[in-house]
Image (cartoon, helix red, strand yellow):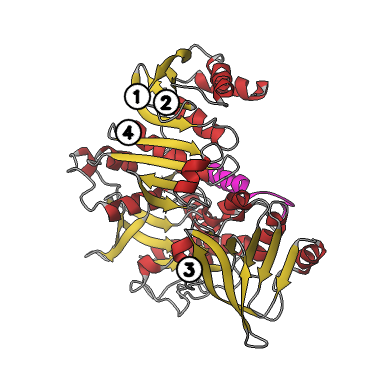
Amino acid sequence: MLDQGLLDAVKSYSENMTRSISFVIGQGDHAKKAELIDFLKQIAGTTDKINFDETATDASLPSPISFKVATEGQDTGIVFSGIPGGHEFTSLILAILQAGGHTLKLDDSIQKMVQRIAHPLKFQTYVSLSCHNCPEVVQALNQFALLNDGISNEMIDGALFQEQVEANNIQGVPAVFLNGKPFLNGKVDTARIIDKLQDQYPDLLAAPSEDDAEQLERQDVTIIGGGPAGVASAIYSARKGLKVTIVADRIGGQVKDTQAIENLISVPLTTGNELSANFEKHLVEYDITVKEHVSVKELSETEDANYSVKLNTGEQFETRSIIIATGAQWRKLNVPGEEENIGSGVAYCPHCDGPFFKGKDIAVIGGGNSGIEAALDLAGIVKNVTVFEFADNLKADQVLINKAKETKNINIITSAATKEIKAKDGKVTSIIYEDRTTGATKEQDLSAVFVQIGLIPNSDFVKGFVDVNRFGEIEIDEACKTHRRGIFAAGDVTTVPFKQINIAMGEGSKAALSAFEYLVMQ
């Protein structure tokens, strides 16, 4: 099942393990049981630090094709239900390595916070092995389990547990359940998981220890956001010899969700994951404090004319200047039936959720580049794609429009105003739209709606602190200055037109130079 290259990689990675781990499989028979046993045997055969005895079973595991990861005989709280191939193979390998003593990928402040969680948390994460967003969630929750004995996480391959998927009306992944109830759905990062936990459990954390009270020393520049603008700001600031911290839910930001990037100057073709990985490599070349997977809860001015930054982990530190580069997120339709059916037929990521609608009729809302690209991707999976565009003409690049018109199972409707998404028994069944040319209201039967209508700036946390326009964009001048002294902004979160990677990088660099100029004049 596994090629030799993968097995050699496992063997190489395992050399850094400081303690052994073992797989323990569930009891009973299943059509996939022999395949799972062979899969685990191959991995265990790469090193004596990974043990597997197929006769040693655990009746408490939820399925015959479930297995847990144990460390020196002790449960880690990590369970996989199914065979974690595809994108989830990385989740398994990281679970093995981290349970075996490898360094966790979470910021120290997050680790301390997770260790303080006093509530028992049992997570179940439903995934598709083709979903590129699912591993991020699985890997984060697996690390939570390793840090706290009261936390567990079970990865569930939805393709092998269709009865559970149907019973829970799951039509999008990742779908996370907490203590038996829906918790999160769709693309989420560690910062969002923490925020959601804190919303649901106001008394989530036990009292902090003295170690938890340690704070970062005062910074010259704090960059909020890890996309192209934020990374450029951090690198330019560090090159000026400034003391720099970058705070981000994830390095790469929205770029990380982009499949193909063909307009990054000097690079004919790359992907969001590759570019994000290169961002990380570039950041570590400089003396930059990177606080990833956390979010900023509050900004305030200090008595000595500096600023205080408070994170969702409870950590707080002082900085002389701030660059806000928090980017943007998917814009929603804000029509009846959208919010309540997210994960049940309403989706924003065609790559993650498209496979759930194989052979079915679906809609894409939006005729810009993202909408037409989504339609082309989905056309190879679903039966028919109908693109609904509000304007009289598509806004996508002509080359994409031509491809869409040449694709037999793509239908395009312009001058269409989406009015409602209808559902029955927890599943999307149709879309109601108005023909803006005639004024007639029409209904089209379908199984899913993929919303691709652009982005909205991630500026809610600074509204009232800096000036924003009616669209929520932070207002800046030609030097990336906001109305507030020592506060700068760059990239898609600002009023700068044309939201592009190249432009964001330039604006981030400019913001850093402006911040440096401000600091040397103090």
SS under mark 2: strand
**Image position, residue 414 (x, y; %):** 69, 77
Q: Earlier in the sequence, mark 3 or mark 2?
A: 2
The mark that comes first in sequence, 3 or 1, is 1
The reply to whether discs 3 and 4 touch (Cβ–Cβ < 8 Å) is no
Instruction: Give the CA separation, mark 3 to mark 4.
Output: 39 Å
User: Which disc is residue 337 wearing?
Assistant: 3
Q: Which residues are magenta?
A: 265-284
Which badge, 3 or 4, is on the more N-terminal residue? 4
Disc with the residue nearer the chain's start (2 vs 4): 2
State the residue position of label 1.
75
Q: What whole-number distance in Å separates the C-alpha atoms at marks 1 and 4?
A: 12 Å
Q: Give the residue type at disc 1.
A: Asp
Which mark is in front, 3 or 1?
3
Q: Label 4: which residue?
A: 147
Q: Are marks 1 and 4 in contact (CB under 8 Å)?
A: no
Q: Magenta stretch containing residue 266, yes or no?
A: yes
Residue type at numbered disc 3: Gly
- Mark 3 or mark 2, which is nearer to you? 3
